[in-house]
Structure formats: structure tokens, C-alpha cells
Image (spheres, rainbow, N blue to C red):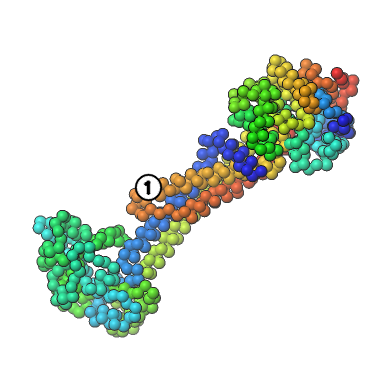
Amino acid sequence: MIFNAVFLALRQISRNYLRAFLTMLGVIIGVGAVIIMINLGNGTQAMIKEAIESLGSNLLMIHAPPHLNPSGTTKSRYFTMKEVETIEERVAGIKAVAPVNAGSAVAKYMNKNVQTSVQGVTDGFFTAVDWKTAEGRSFENKEYVAGTNTCIIGESVRKNLLGDTPAIGIRLKVGSVVCEVVGVLESKGQGGRGNDQDDIILMPLKAFQRSIRPNNSIYNITMIMVSLNEDVDYKAASEQIAVMLRHMRNITDKTKDTFEIQSTKEIQQTVEKSIGSMTAFIGAVAGVSLLVGGIGIMNIMLVSVTERTREIGTRLAIGALEKEVLLQFLVESATISAVGGLIGIVFGFFMTLLLSAKLHIPFTFDVKTATVSFVFSGLIGIIFGYLPARKASRLNPIDALHHE
Amino acid sequence: MSDFIKLRNIVKVYGSGENSFLALKGIDLDINVGEFVALMGPSGSGKSTMANILGCLDKATKGSYFFNGVDVFSLNRNETALLRRNYIGFIFQGFNLLARTTALENVELPLLYRGVPKKQRHERARQALDMVGLLEWGKHTSAQLSGGQQQRVAIARAIASNPLFLLADEPTGNLDTKRSVEIMEILSNLNKQLGITILMVTHEPDMAQYASREVHFRDGEINTAEAVLR
């Protein structure tokens, strides 16, 4: 009986493609919107996650931002080598500690010059942010100790400044000093804020402190990156470091901290949460359009029942049972809706493909969302088709036969 | 044999209270197997009401109706639907073919409800179309057929399920004389060759000529004076 009903319903739909399509439109748009929103949301989330992970997946960043608290009464303070060493000695489960002193300078080669980010680093930097050289070598220990003017350049700097010239051994002018290129970093691409991570020059920390940003203060480290082993609880480690720094800086009130600790894990969780709730919200809005689509189906099915009153009368007269007529119209609306859902999924797939290419978001397509949307659209057809179907099945055959 | 259709004291009241209208005033009617009965009378005489009751589409307010030994009025909506499905064929004044549907598909419809397998359904629908002389028109939709052809398709649909009883409600009401005669000849043949019992509602005496018996209605009663038996 179900098979017969499906057969009758498909035959009915095939008799008026335009109407079937217009009826489906609401569901097509609704399902399409759900698919696009959820997949673009997932793509964005994946992109941001990757960008954060490119920093190192369990990394603490201790820095001294200019404005620590809203009133701005507490002045932040950079870090000392002593603080770095204390952290390295006392905190358990550390993979690497990387004191960084960052600034920006103009780099020159022949007649070209570019403004770029320059960072003074130690050996721990490469481990902490999981970065390797693609060409040449990393800094040698004696270079860190002596603070020789050697540098490792990012892919963008190499491209913009040197072009096709082999990079290794070339002497660049960075700021006011000349430094020899010993290596080129492998490309990292875009960062979490859309910044170019490859636009960078690295120098041994001591060389940077002496040549790029001369400073007599012992507070000459702008940021400490602490890479923790994957199984280490970032919250506990972060708290331990905070306590240590407060002790060394004689801070008693933690609202008067002169530093700030951020965790990539924490940032990642916050971002994921906010994108997740955003996706859910937009998904819900798209869901409303599905509901509207359902109402559209109900509307057309009611019109269809009125239009086909004589047909229903004929069917009832020649012996169709009430439940067979009910089933016929239910299957019809469910089929229309499900086909609409299918078209919506295909539409959503291609729109996601198009939009993710335009917005530079990695393309993702969640099969689970598509399946749920498909089932849901069929369900909408059944729910919103029930009233018209019941109306059809309850018709009095004599009245229906004489309907004009 | 004489128990095929037995109606006793059929009363049909429409509405209630002061506005009620007595459409049938206690009808007794028997139809035997193989009869071709013409139900005649002016409009408002109750003949259509009678036809609806005979076709198990409507129930009387009072009285009893035995169809092939079954007490029709004791059946529920589903049971009467099954009775119609299995034993009664319908031909309507307005043809009532499904729109945008081929002749063959229309004829297959009652077989579809009977759950006849596809191949058999096809075969029987073709046979029925052949009987009304429209075999080569099977692929045409209703809109592509003339009125007379549409009514012939409707007859094919009515007989495709081999009914015991054919109910034709003004089958020639929408047709010109030439087409009407064609339809009547087909009905007459079905009656004579296949032995299908036919009840036809009409107000045209010319068409009633084809029937083996005329029953005349007037003001909700059978007018015995006008009865004709051929």
C-alpha cells in the first residue's frame, strides 16, 4: 500500500514540475541556508583552530600589554632573563621556554627595502612554535651566546627582498646593522588575525638587544613563550607562573599584575565557543526559513486538495479507503519536501564551495548535517502535509464528485 | 437471483427540523442480476439520491438495503469503500477522469486500489480499453480526447475491475446525440454480453430505450403507472 502511495505521489508530482518546484522553493532555501551556514561556520572554526595551533597547541604566552586593566593605573613591565630562567627551572612539564624581544625594522638588500617584523629569539623559540628552517640552518649555540649578527628570514621577506637570488650567505641591512642570512624559515601562511606570519626576520636574542633595540634596562624581553607538554594542565602551569612572577615583582594584589598570561588552548576554546554559538544562532535562523517552507507546502497542498476535490471524490467512489487517500497526500507532500531538501543540499553544497573560495575559508561539507536536513525536510512535509491530507481523506464522495 | 439488490422502505431526509426535506418517501426496489434498469424522472424527483444510495455512496435515513446479500447500511465507511472497490463500477455525467493522466492510467486506477500487480493491471486495462474501442488511444491524456472518448474511457475504467454492478449517473448528459448513442450501445453490449447488471440514471427517454426496465421517480416516490418492462 505504501509502495502504491509513493507511486501515485511521484506520478502526481511529475504532472506539474513548475508547481512542485515553486512549492519546494521554501524548503530548498531553508535547507540550503542551513547547509551553507553550518559548513561555513565549521570551515571558519577549522581555519582559526589551525591558525592557533600553528603557534603550538599547548603554549602559554606571557606578555606585558600596554593596557592591563581598564583604568590603566597599573603599568606593565617587560621581563628579565632571570624571570625566564626561573620559569624554566621551576615549572614542570615544559617543552621549551622562548624569551622573545620583538620590534620592527626596515630590511634592505641592494636597492630594495621592506618594513618587517624583527624578533630576537633563543633556541627554545623553534621548539615552542614548532618552526623549522626550510633552507640553510638554524642559529648555533655560539651565535646565541655571542649575539652575532646573523639572521633567519621568513618566506615573504625572502620573496619580497631577494626574489630569485639564493638567500643563504647574503648580507642584509636590518635597521642599522648588517646581518648575514643563515637560513630561510618554512612558510606558515596566514595567522589567526589574517596577518602574514612569514613576514619576519629572526635574530639571536642578544644580537637583537644590542643592535635593533638597544636597552640598558634588565627588563628587555617583551614576551615569554612557554611550550608545555601536551598532557600538562595549562591552567595549573599558568597559575604557577603567575605566582612566581608576582613573588619576584613583589606584587601582593593580583589585580595589580604587571603582566598577562594567555594560553593558546584557552583562546582556542573561547573562539570555538563563540563560533559555535554563532553557527547555532544562524542555523536557527535558517531553521525558521525551513518552517516557513513547511507552511508554504501546507498552503499549496490545501490549494491542491481543493483543486482536486473531484479527483478525490472519484478515487473515494471507486473504492479508495480513507487511509489510502490520506497516505497519498502525505506521501505527496513528504516527497515534494524531501526532493526540495535534496535540491537544497546540492544547492548548499555548491554555494558553500563558492563562498568558501571567495571568503578564503577552507571548504568543509558535513555529511551528518546534510543527512539530518534531508530527514528533517521529509518530516516537515509529513507534518505540514497532514492537515491537507486529512481534509482530503475526510471528504464526502458525493459532495466531492459534484464539486465545481 | 432476485436477491441481488433489495431495497425496502428507503426514506431519505435532508436537513433537520423545519428545514428538513423528504427526498425519498419509502422506496421499495428490487433489481435482479443481468437487468439493465433506467432510473428516470424530472430533476428533484429523488432519482439521484436513489442512485447514490444504490452505489453505496450514501446511506438512507431509514430502511434497508441488501446488496448481493450484504446489509449495506450496517457497514462502516471503510467497508462500504471496499464493497464499491470490489463490486461496483461508476460512470459519471462529468466523466471524472484524472487530469494530465493517460487513458490507460485512468483505467488502471481501480486495479491499483485493488492491488493488482503491474503486469496484470496493464493487461486488464488494455482489454477494457479494447472493449470500448479505444485501445490505440491508451497513451493519450484526458485533454487530448473528445467528450465521447472520455466517457468511453470512464466506462473502461468502470468495467476494468469486473464489477457485478455498474452505476451510470446521466452518462450521456454531457454528450450530443451521436456520441450518446455510441455510449448506450456500449452499455447495452456490456449488459448483454458480459451480463453486468446496470443501473442508469437519465432523463432522456431515447436513452432509456436501451434499458430492459424503466423505473420512474416523481416527488420521492416510484410512479408505477409509468413503469416499462421490455
Give the left or right position of residue B11, taking residue A226 as reference.
Answer: right
Q: Nearer the viewer, residue A158 or A3?
A: A3
Give the left or right position of residue B34, taking residue A354 as reference.
Answer: right
Which quadrant of the figure contains the N terminus of chain A?
A: top right
Is the residue A126 above or below the residue B8 in the image? below
**Visible in this render: residue A239?**
yes
Tally of numbered discs: 1
Residue B52 location, quadrant: top right
Q: Nearer the viewer, residue B200 or B225?
A: B200
Which residue is disc 1 drawn over? Answer: A354
Q: Dot 1: what SS?
A: helix
Give the left or right position of residue A25, taking residue A8 as reference.
Answer: left
Give the left or right position of residue A384, taking residue B200 as reference.
Answer: left
- Across and down, in percent, residue B198 comes to 79, 26
Label 1 resides on the chain identified as: A
Is the residue B52 above or below the residue A226 in the image? above
- Across and down, in percent, residue A188 comes to 27, 61
Q: Residue drawn 85% across and 37% down?
A: B69
Q: Residue drawn 46% across and 51% down?
A: A35
Q: Nearer the viewer, residue A41 or A8?
A: A8
Q: Residue drawn 28% across and 59% down?
A: A189
- The amino acid type, in three-letter code, at marker 1 is Leu
- Across and down, in percent, residue B108 comes to 66, 32
- Across and down, in percent, residue A284 comes to 49, 55
> Dot 1 surroundings within 10 Å: few (below 14), some, or many (20 or more)?
few
**Visible in this render: residue A215?**
no
Residue A217 location, quadrant: bottom left
Q: Nearer the viewer, residue B226 or A318?
A: A318
Which quadrant of the figure contains the C terminus of chain A?
A: top right
Q: Residue drawn 80% across and 33% down?
A: B53
